[in-house]
């Protein structure tokens, strides 16, 4: 009987109590870990998203946990490739979590529903996530794209393109496929008479100034500023204002070459009537060799970088923010890569992660040059380097890889293989002018026109066909006695350069960084290694990667115009193209997927032969560079008020927070905004502060006197600036006889959040700790 009772008790323990004990034990083990993740918060909303924008994980961030006594709990963790970390802290007690070793120039925050700041307080078993961002990666919601477009003839001296749009905007997410002039989605910013032909685009977010640089384009004239002009378009108000920002030649003495077009000769002058063809003979050989290439603005928005096509140098122009006309310049001489039978000619410039990147090509333009001599180079430069010409070669690669078909009709296929740069109309051979598919004129010549960087550091490189700026659309040849009409067709390209372990590697057979797009193993071969990553740069868009895109017997496999933009987190790159949707001899943009290389959508900026016979440039580089008009990332400041139990001036784990305390933001002696500290965390935050601004102040009002805040009864400020870690000390001081505490600070650039503005409080000195402390914790802390 006793044995049976004992057996029943053992069974009951095994089947009922033991599982509960195991579960409790497992729970306790789980409670002894702190976990979390670090991610890139592109849209600065304090939470990670897995849809647009896709916010990737951040590896290599250091995470530490500290006990209530300030000693480290568990081992130091480093976030993994998926951004996660785990620290075995061995306790369920309160902990202080510190994140450090963030990527250079990244900032934490803003505080959000699933992201804290770089200092967080949790219990063992809790979670601490951190969103970080490089401020220049922020773009805001519903940005617009801006690009130059061109028209035939001169916009000056009574030219009837004077009032036509030459700078236009496009919504990044358009409602449909619109055509300029028939849709309200396109915005017209600058007229022909204001800017003429331009290519480079840059945007200063803080001032809302758009900049565009002069371009030598045959059949289309310069604006009033001539070949050295950079124009400014102020879009900060309800009406845009376009002005000449700087003439590099007249204002800074930079030789950009001479516009030798003869405007006094009736035979060789540019047409004043945009529908009339012209010879414009002297411009043909000078394309890409004079005037300006791309322009760029540094992330702090205080410096402009310009490529001068004439002397082949990179110019550094201090412009300040908001931008004013530069009065000084620094010329940077690019390396000579030792081109075979050619000249190194730069065009692209990109500022990224504190460095300037310049791209160009060896042109094979000298006697004996062949496509085997064509080669692309990309260099980087550290601004402020003691040696102004200290460039580092990032990558180089030959340009004689297989390419697709420029144009094909029912009988003729004309190859897009790159050719050496040419100087004369008679240099166009195989096919000779007017004998390509559909009697088109084709002679692809590479210009490395644009560089963008993806989220993983990979480069996306745009190539523009120089011939598109030499040939024109339904226009004359340079030969003054030739009155035949020629249709030029360009054939640019879009390449991906993978980045891994500090090394850049050109795509090969549609593969970059181990990602294989839909363009691998193409037949006939296209792209480096016989397949192209962005394989749907074709008209019309065809699911068959191996065939020309046939529509009634016609098609193009290289529609790229070489202007690029990337909205980080959207997993796509945008490029200017011809025939973007269905109309031919049209211009617009295409979006390309950065994973599978397809083109999910397109958008027309101008339609088929818009404006009439040969007015727009059809398939011959009818659009220029692309730029996103991104908003500046807001600046967030603030952090935490707490009760400093041990009176050491350091925020220790387990020390109570002060909730419901009034905190004010002041600037220049004027109160801007008021907040109260959070009911759970004791935190406060202000956002929308002006960048690079001084005389800001956080005030905790009424910390003494007859109007003292109830939540601060019996309290005074703790020690200021204790220890060496500004993120966990107390910053508030009282000046003179003020009844408020102050934290003075200045702001940095846009998006440079400051979460170090803390204030600690201790019992006033007349209290006895054993009497005051329990009362204050109960009364003040919720």
Image (spheres, grey):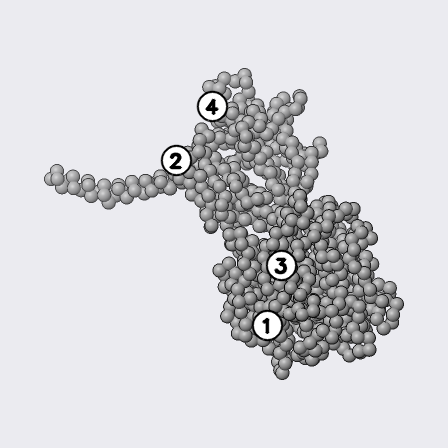
Return the mark for residue 555.
Answer: none
> Label 2's element?
loop
Give the percent coordinates (x, y) of residue 561.
66, 65
Classify 10 Å Cα crowding around label 1: few (below 14), some (14-19), many (20 and above). many
The answer for how far apart the CA atoms under marks 2 and 4 are is: 25 Å
Instruction: Say which label, 4 or 1, has the lower sequence index.
Output: 1
Q: Residue tagged by mark 1?
A: 404
Q: Quadrant of residue 604?
A: bottom right
Q: Position of residue 558 (x, y in %)?
A: 62, 70
Q: What distance separates the C-alpha of mark 2 from that of mark 1?
A: 64 Å
Disc 3 secondary structure class: strand
Q: Residue 269 placed where, x, y %? A: 84, 69
Q: Residue at x 23, y 41 (%)?
A: 13
- The furthest residue to the bottom: 411
Q: Give residue 774's mark.
A: 4
Task: Please give the residue where the numbered disc 2 appears in the rendered image.
Answer: 91
Residue at x-position 48% and y-position 19%: 769
Asked if the residue at tag 1 contacts the one at tag 2, i.e. Cβ–Cβ closer than 8 Å, the answer is no
| Labels 2 & 4 near each other (Cβ < 8 A) | no
Front tag of 3 and 1: 3
Residue 468 or residue 648, whichever sits in front: 468
Callout 3 environment at 10 Å: few (<14), some (14 to 19), or many (20+)? Answer: many
Determine whether 158 is above or below 18 in the image.
below
Question: Which of these two is toward me, 408 or 599?
Answer: 408
- Between 85 and 478, the one nearer to me in the picture: 478
Name the residue beneath numbered marker 3: 377
């Amino acid at each position: 009987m006793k044995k049976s009772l004992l057996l029943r008790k053992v069974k009951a323990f095994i089947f009922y109590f033991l599982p509960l004990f195991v579960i409790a034990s497992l729970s306790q083990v789980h409670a002894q870990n702190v976990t979390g993740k670090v991610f890139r918060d592109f849209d600065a909303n304090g939470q990670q998203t897995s849809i647009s924008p896709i916010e990737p994980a951040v590896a290599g961030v250091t995470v530490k946990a500290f006990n209530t006594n300030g000693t480290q709990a568990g081992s130091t963790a480093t976030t993994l490739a998926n951004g996660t970390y785990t620290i075995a802290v061995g306790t369920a007690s309160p902990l202080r979590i510190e994140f450090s070793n963030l990527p250079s120039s990244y900032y934490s925050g803003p505080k959000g529903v699933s992201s804290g700041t770089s200092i967080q307080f949790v219990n063992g078993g809790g979670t601490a996530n951190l969103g970080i961002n490089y401020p220049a990666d922020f773009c805001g919601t519903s940005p617009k794209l801006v690009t130059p477009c061109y028209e035939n003839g001169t916009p000056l001296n009574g030219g009837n393109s004077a009032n036509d749009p030459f700078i236009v905007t496009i919504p990044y997410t358009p409602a449909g496929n619109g055509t300029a002039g028939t849709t309200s989605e396109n915005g017209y910013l600058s007229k022909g008479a204001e800017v003429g032909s331009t290519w480079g685009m840059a945007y200063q977010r803080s001032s809302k100034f758009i900049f565009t640089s002069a371009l030598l384009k045959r059949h289309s004239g310069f604006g009033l500023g001539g070949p050295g002009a950079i124009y400014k378009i102020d879009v900060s108000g309800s009406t845009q204002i376009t002005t000449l920002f700087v003439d590099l030649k007249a204002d800074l003495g930079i030789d950009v070459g001479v516009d030798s077009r003869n405007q006094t000769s009736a035979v060789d002058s540019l047409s004043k009537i945009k529908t009339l063809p012209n010879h414009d003979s002297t411009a043909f050989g000078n394309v890409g060799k004079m005037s300006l290439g791309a322009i760029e603005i540094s992330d702090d928005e205080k410096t402009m970088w310009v490529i001068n096509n004439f002397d082949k140098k990179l110019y550094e122009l201090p412009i300040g923010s908001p931008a004013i006309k530069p009065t000084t310049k620094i010329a940077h001489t690019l390396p000579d890569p030792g081109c075979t039978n050619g000249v190194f000619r730069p065009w692209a410039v990109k500022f990224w992660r504190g460095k300037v990147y310049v791209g160009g090509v060896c042109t094979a333009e000298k006697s004996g040059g062949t496509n085997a001599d064509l080669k692309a180079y990309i260099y980087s430069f550290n601004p402020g380097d003691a040696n102004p010409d200290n460039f580092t070669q990032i990558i180089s690669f030959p340009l004689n890889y297989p390419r697709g078909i420029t144009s094909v009709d029912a009988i003729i296929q004309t190859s897009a293989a790159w050719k050496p740069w040419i100087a004369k109309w008679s240099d166009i051979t195989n096919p000779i002018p007017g004998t390509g598919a559909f009697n088109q004129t084709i002679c692809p010549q590479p210009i490395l026109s644009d560089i963008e960087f993806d989220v993983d550091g990979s480069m996306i490189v745009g190539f523009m066909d120089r011939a598109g700026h030499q040939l024109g659309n339904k226009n004359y040849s340079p030969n003054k006695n030739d009155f035949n009409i020629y249709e030029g067709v360009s054939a640019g390209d879009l390449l991906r350069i993978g980045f891994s372990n500090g090394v850049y590697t050109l795509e090969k057979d549609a593969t970059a960084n181990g990602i294989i797009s839909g363009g691998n193993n193409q037949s006939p071969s296209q792209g480096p290694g016989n397949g192209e990553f962005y394989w749907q740069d074709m008209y019309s868009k065809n699911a068959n990667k191996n065939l020309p895109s046939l529509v009634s017997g016609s098609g193009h496999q290289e529609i790229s115009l070489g202007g690029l933009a990337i909205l980080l987190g959207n997993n796509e790159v945008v490029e200017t193209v011809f025939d973007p949707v269905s109309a031919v001899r049209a211009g617009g943009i295409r979006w390309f997927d950065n994973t599978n290389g397809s083109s999910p959508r397109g958008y027309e900026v101008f339609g088929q032969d818009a404006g009439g016979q040969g007015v727009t440039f059809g398939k011959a580089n009818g659009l220029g560079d692309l730029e996103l008009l991104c908003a500046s990332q807001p600046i967030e400041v603030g952090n935490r008020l707490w009760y400093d139990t041990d009176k050491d001036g350091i925020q220790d784990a387990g020390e109570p927070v002060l909730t419901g305390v009034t905190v004010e933001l002041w600037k220049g002696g004027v109160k801007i905004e008021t907040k109260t500290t959070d009911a759970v965390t004791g935190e406060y935050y202000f956002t929308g502060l002006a960048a690079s601004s001084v005389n800001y102040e956080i005030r905790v009002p009424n910390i003494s006197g007859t109007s003292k805040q109830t939540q601060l009864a019996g309290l005074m400020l703790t020690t200021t600036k204790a220890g060496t870690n500004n993120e966990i000390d107390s910053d508030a001081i009282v000046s003179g006889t003020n009844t408020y505490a102050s934290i003075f600070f200045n702001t940095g650039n846009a998006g440079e959040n400051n979460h170090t503005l803390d204030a600690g409080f201790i019992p006033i000195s007349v209290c006895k700790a054993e009497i005051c402390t329990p009362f204050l914790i109960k009364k003040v802390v919720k």
